[in-house]
Image (cartoon, helix red, strand yellow):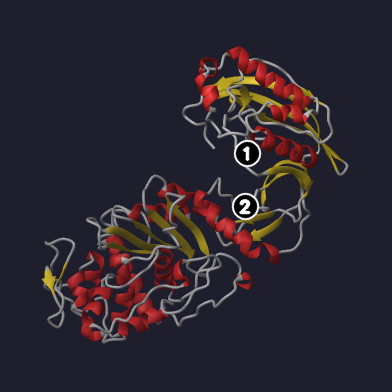
Amino acid sequence: MPVARSVKVGIVGGVFTAMVGVAGVGAYNIYTGLDGGGGSGTPGVRSQAAAADPTTRAPLTGKEITATAGSFLAAWSSGDTAAAAALTNSPETAASDLEAYTTGAHIGSVKTAPGAATPGGERFTVTARIAYGGQNSTWTYGSSLTVTRNSAGDPAVAWSASVLNPGLASGDTLLTSTRDAPDLEVTDRAGNVLTGDRYPSLARIIADLKQRYGDRLTGGTPAIGTWVRKADGSDGPMLHVLRKGTGMRLRTTLDATLQSAAEKAVSGRNGAGVTALDTRSGAVLAVAYSPADGVDLALMEDSAPGSTFKIVTAAALLDSGMTPSSTAPCKADDNYANGRMYHNDSPTLHKADATLAWDFAQSCNTGFIRQAGRLGSNGLKNTAAKFGLTREWSVGTPTLDGRPDMPDSSAPDELTSEMIGQGELGMSPLVMASVAATAASGDFHQPLIVDRGLVEGPVATASGLSSRTTGYLRQMMRGAITDGTASGVMSGFGPGSGAKTGSAEVSGQSTTNGWFAAYAGHVAAAAVVHDAGHGNTTAGPIVAAVLRAGR
């Protein structure tokens, strides 16, 4: 709890060293000034009698601060926890915390040494001697304390659990013991350990994987150390290791190199998400989003994918008998069957003798919607099923609703809207990366982030695309790079690559979401950037950066 604004807080200014020789008494924190809870009176507020006394309203002097801190540390060092607690602004809470620390941390002695002064206090180095289970260890860490006035107006140590150790919150305790189970490390496919500190976008996923699969793994030996028992009874972090354990390892499909590239690519972009997959297996290679403490836009996004969905629509039209060279006139504005009027992103985009390949490369909306009669009410959805978009997915970690969103497209205006990636469609970069992967290989492999044997729930299957449709689709996606809207951002990618740009209108936004889906070699990736404009300049650089890392 922060210090009440009306309370003057003094920081220990003296230099001193305290030795503790009482078994079980441990390291302490002299770090953050907090008004306590659980003591007599209201924290940070003096009684009326004290408030009436001018001397109690005076700022703390350096002498008062030094004397109070020194007395507290001397009492604690001597093992007189009752006297130490009495020198705080919450004696009852302090006494309880000190007793719990004494019995739980197994610290035989403590030595403190002064450190550098800071704007909020003065840091100290704490060296603690720990003995437990035949293990002896020295633990050194930084700590500090603050001095305030108690409810009677007297100088007192501002009490909180963090006075014992900076890693403790209110109600937490320190314990030295053997952990109940071996540590669990999450690794990439090559055995590199993945952590949320190094890969911020994976923090949520790593925690979920540990909880989801930890009790299904075997092996390893538990560590012995000093760790936090949280106020709710759960285990907190281990702060000091007396004996290292051998951890269990959960191998994921992720690739540390691609993950690093993905984290860097989305860094600093608000509302961005990207997912990369292995086109040969559907293995999830990278997941990143920004801000990393926000919504997981890589796996949990649910919005219209814009023209990136023309990959599916083009496949459906190819399945209906069209070829890349089939005529598909591109008009500036057009409709189908007297339905909704559509336009292109650029009012100058039109070509009377356009082909399906030209429409795809230039992302002409009207050239696509005019072909709706070839698909009927089920043609688009039937082809979407070949991409696995009508089945439930179990990826191994939560994704939005566990499945893509392919709504009923029987209504004419809904069908034409879906043909250009709008309407009621709801997709994520994970889904669109899978679409690109299916286009690249012709086969659908449901994305997975862990070995299939660990996954509970259905793993979707689908027929994939015919060799004819796959060949034509790859030709058209390559054309988007060589002669179309993806040419700039995908410059330098060779014949084994293909892409599709997208911009999606979203209700309530003045600017479109940028989308981009592409593959190069055996890596496919897709990205979205919210409220950012055209996909080739917003999401495209993110995808291109990840694909380059996969070369």
Please state which of residues 174 and 425 is positioned toward the viewer in this rendering. 174
Question: Which residue was labeled with disc 2?
Answer: 192
Residue type of the residue flagged with mark 1 = Gly
- Quarter of the image holding residue 456? bottom right
| Residue 491 in view here | no
Please state which of residues 464 and 222 is positioned toward the viewer in this rendering. 222
Question: Which residue was labeled with disc 1?
Answer: 38
Neighbour class for label 2 at 10 Å: few (<14), some, many (≥20)?
A: some
Q: Residue 386, position in %: x, y? A: 41, 80
Give me the C-alpha separation between circle 2 and circle 1.
46 Å
- Relative side of 317 to 153, left or right: left
**Residue at the location (51% across, 63% down)?**
284
Q: How many marks?
A: 2
Please state which of residues 527 and 315 is positioned toward the viewer in this rendering. 527
**Residue at the location (59% across, 27% down)?**
150
Taking 333 as reference, is 483 above or below it? above
Q: Residue 26, position in %: x, y? A: 76, 33
**Residue at the location (43% across, 59% down)?**
298
Name the quadrant of the N terminus: top right
